[in-house]
Image: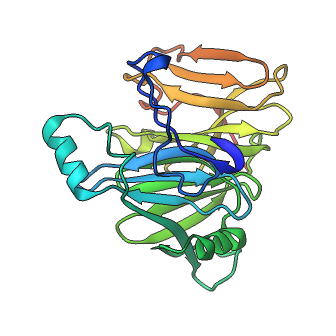
């Protein structure tokens, strides 16, 4: 919930009608924030972690580790409704650039129980976090004002930072989504775009090359709500202020995560 410093993180069950949803937030939001996107790492189902970005100049990225007994009960019963609403451990991201400079492209990171300390760190090194995704122990998030992509190795506690400014991708990166494939060369990380002259959907391959998937010269509002069907053959996006939602498929019939796409490459 983006609501200044008082937003919270809510959980909705898509199988329930609106009048049956819980009327209280999860514990992920703590004392509140300008929360943007959510992701989780459940490689170890008995020790999952959950992450939320905070679109503020002093908004540190949140990590929540749920109570171990609550997780065990959920795994045994199949009812996970209490995992995010029962108190656990809240921590916030601290980046440690290799030479201590905001311009460094790599470094290490840690988690702290002091939100104030982490908020100061975010203000110095990773302001206004937006989209986030996690695949195979790698956490991806973007910062919209500085237009950077951060990749955190959750096991090695190291990170890298690259620019998202390339070719037609001239706006601020918003939501992100990664598609994996059996062939690593076919994996793509997809970005929504905010505040560009012609917002669209862009992608980055495993070599760091950027591509334009969709580019509109008639719709000016930001792209958001990026999602894929279970078979990855349908891409869903919306143009926020225009109130339009698109279902996009490849002309060759392949999933978006299979085979190199025939799309516009950004040479610079």
Rendered position, 143 above or below 58: above
The quarter of the rendered structure image containing the N terminus is top right
Where is residue 212 drawn, in percent x and y?
Answer: 67, 34
Residue at 73%, 17% (x, y): give it.
243
Look at the image and tell me whether residue 104 can be seen.
yes
Give the left or right position of residue 268, taking residue 141 as reference. right
Give the left or right position of residue 110, taking residue 120 as reference. left
Residue at 71%, 56% (x, y): give it.
56
Which of 50 and 104 lies nearest the eye of the viewer?
Answer: 50
Rendered position, 40 above or below 256: below
Give the left or right position of residue 74, taking residue 112 as reference. left
Count the numbered circles shown: 0
- In the rendered image, the residue lying farthest to the bottom is 99
Where is residue 194 drawn, in percent x and y?
Answer: 76, 39
Look at the image and tell me whether residue 207 can be seen.
no
- In the rendered image, the residue lying farthest to the left is 76
Residue at 53%, 67% (x, y): give it.
93
Q: Quadrant of residue 196?
A: top right
Give the left or right position of residue 193, taking residue 69 as reference. right
Where is residue 123 drawn, in percent x and y?
Answer: 71, 69
Residue at 57%, 82% (x, y): give it.
98
Which of 61 and 146 lies nearest the eye of the viewer?
Answer: 61
Which of 18 and 261 lies nearest the eye of the viewer?
Answer: 18
> Which colouring convention does the figure follow?
rainbow
Where is residue 77 drawn, in percent x and y?
Answer: 15, 36
Which of 266 and 59 lies nearest the eye of the viewer?
Answer: 59
């Amino acid at each position: 919930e983006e609501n200044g410093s008082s937003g919270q993180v809510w959980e909705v069950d898509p199988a329930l009608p609106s009048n049956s949803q819980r009327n209280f937030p999860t514990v992920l939001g703590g004392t509140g924030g300008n929360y943007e996107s959510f992701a989780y790492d459940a490689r170890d189902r008995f020790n999952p972690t959950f992450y939320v970005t905070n679109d503020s100049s002093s908004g540190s990225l949140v990590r929540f580790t749920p109570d171990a007994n609550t997780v065990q009960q959920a795994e045994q019963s199949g009812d996970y409704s209490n995992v995010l609403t029962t108190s656990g451990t809240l921590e916030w991201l601290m980046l440690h650039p290799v030479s201590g400079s905001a311009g460094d492209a790599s470094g290490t990171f840690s988690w702290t129980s002091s939100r104030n300390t982490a908020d100061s760190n975010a203000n110095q090194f990773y302001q206004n976090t937006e989209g986030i995704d996690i695949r195979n122990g790698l956490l991806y998030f973007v910062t919209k004002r500085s237009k950077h992509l951060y990749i955190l190795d959750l096991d090695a506690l190291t990170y890298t930072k690259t620019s998202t400014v390339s070719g037609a991708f001239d706006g601020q990166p918003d939501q992100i989504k990664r598609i994996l494939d059996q062939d690593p060369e076919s994996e793509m990380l997809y970005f929504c775009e905010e505040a560009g002259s012609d917002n669209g959907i862009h992608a980055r391959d495993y070599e760091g090359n950027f591509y334009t998937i969709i580019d509109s010269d008639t719709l000016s509002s930001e792209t958001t709500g990026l999602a894929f069907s279970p078979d990855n053959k349908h891409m869903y996006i919306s143009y926020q202020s225009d109130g339009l939602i698109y279902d996009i498929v490849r002309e060759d019939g392949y999933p978006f995560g299979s085979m190199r796409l025939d799309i516009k490459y950004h040479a610079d």
